[in-house]
Amino acid sequence: MCRLTAMWSLPTAVLAFSAAALVIAAAGSRLAGLVDRLADRTGLGEAVAGAVLLGSATSLPGLVVSVVAAASDRPNVAVSNSMGGIAVQTTFIVVLDLAYRRENIERAAASLANVFNCLLMITLLGVVVLGVAMPPSSLFGVHPATLLLIAIYGYGLRLGRQISIEPMWHPEMTRETRLDEWAEPAEDESLAGLWWRFGAATAVVGAAGWIVGQAGLSLIDATGLSGTFVAVAFTAVATSLPELVTGVAAVRTGALTLAVGGIIGGNTFDTMFVAVSDLVYRDGPIYAAVGPSDLFVVGWTMLLTGILGAGLIRRDTGRVGFEGVAILGGYSGGLAILSTMR
């Protein structure tokens, strides 16, 4: 298969990677405010806008990296970049806990939609595991797991919207609970203008994601490191920076539900990287090319997501709850184990 990557030297790859990561962080910092205002103007609400608009926009660099990797015959990089992004973004919740000085953010950000999105994400990750375990097959030229991923994700978005509008469960109010409150739009700010600025910022982070993908594949060839490890430890971290900066920005403005929803929604959207990569990868189903280290990353992300979901339900009273400590320890331990795998 023709490889699309132009191999860069190690210094060029490192420089390009660093510059693109800075661009992603800078452009991503504008997205939180834009999506917060769009949530009010469109009536979507912070949890849904965070999951759909902010989650998809901040995940675009990672999607580009996975597509570049799949088209360049690097299926392990494509899959592990997707799963690694979920792992590091889940760990960013601990950073948000520290940024919000008043209380554990899982306790203060009360949203049933965010809990549902955690369950949706575990379901999608389970489909990926099923795809790996299934014998190579196709339906209309596409692996059944890919079709199932797309169908469940689409239906999950619909259910998430319904839960946001008519929740059948309600979180207990605490002194620091911050609900999603509609804000009066600025008179001189048009809805069309908001959408235009949102689209421009999204395009910038997407273009920077392509550079990260090129640089990441060059780093693999130049250093001899495992593609899975580079994807998880480097490209996934760089392309996940928008989730971090937008999350911190949202916390500082008091949009706690948007902050948590942006990360969880971005994680859910990241599972679609596998489906898109399977459509791009032409050497058979991408699930058949998944190795033990890649499957380890899938299980690792399921573990971290389950811990986060438990934290959102338990809503610990500690400054950093049990889930924050467990997620940080789980991420560090998983990364250490992964560094020893090939």
Image: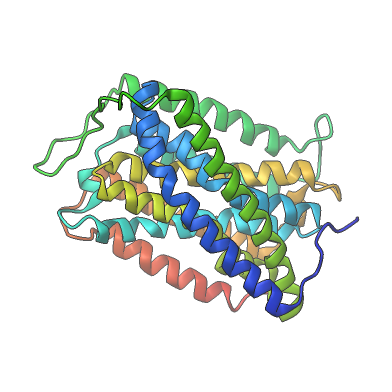
User: What kind of colouring is applied to the model shown?
Assistant: rainbow
Residue 307 % position (x, y): 36, 53
Seen at 76% across and 53% down, the residue is 70
Left or right, residue 91 beside residue 297: left
Left or right, residue 82 beside residue 282: left
Quarter where residue 181 is shown: top left
Which is nearer the eye, 6 or 172? 6
Q: Visible in this render: residue 112?
A: yes
Q: Visible in this render: residue 122?
A: no
Which is nearer the eye, 273 or 55? 55
Q: Is residue 250 above or below residue 35?
A: below
Seen at 63% across and 73% down, the residue is 15
Left or right, residue 113 beside residue 294: left
Residue 9 % position (x, y): 76, 77
Quarter where residue 138 is shown: top right
Q: Is residue 85 above or below residue 153?
A: below
- Taking the view exactly as shown, the residue that stands out farthest to the right is 1
Quadrant assignment for the C terminus: bottom right
Seen at 62% across and 54% down, the residue is 209
Seen at 49% across and 51% down, the residue is 27
Q: Is residue 272 above or below residue 214?
A: above
Residue 325 % position (x, y): 30, 65
Residue 36 % position (x, y): 35, 36
- Taking the view exactly as shown, the residue that stands out farthest to the left is 175
Left or right, residue 5 beside residue 257: right
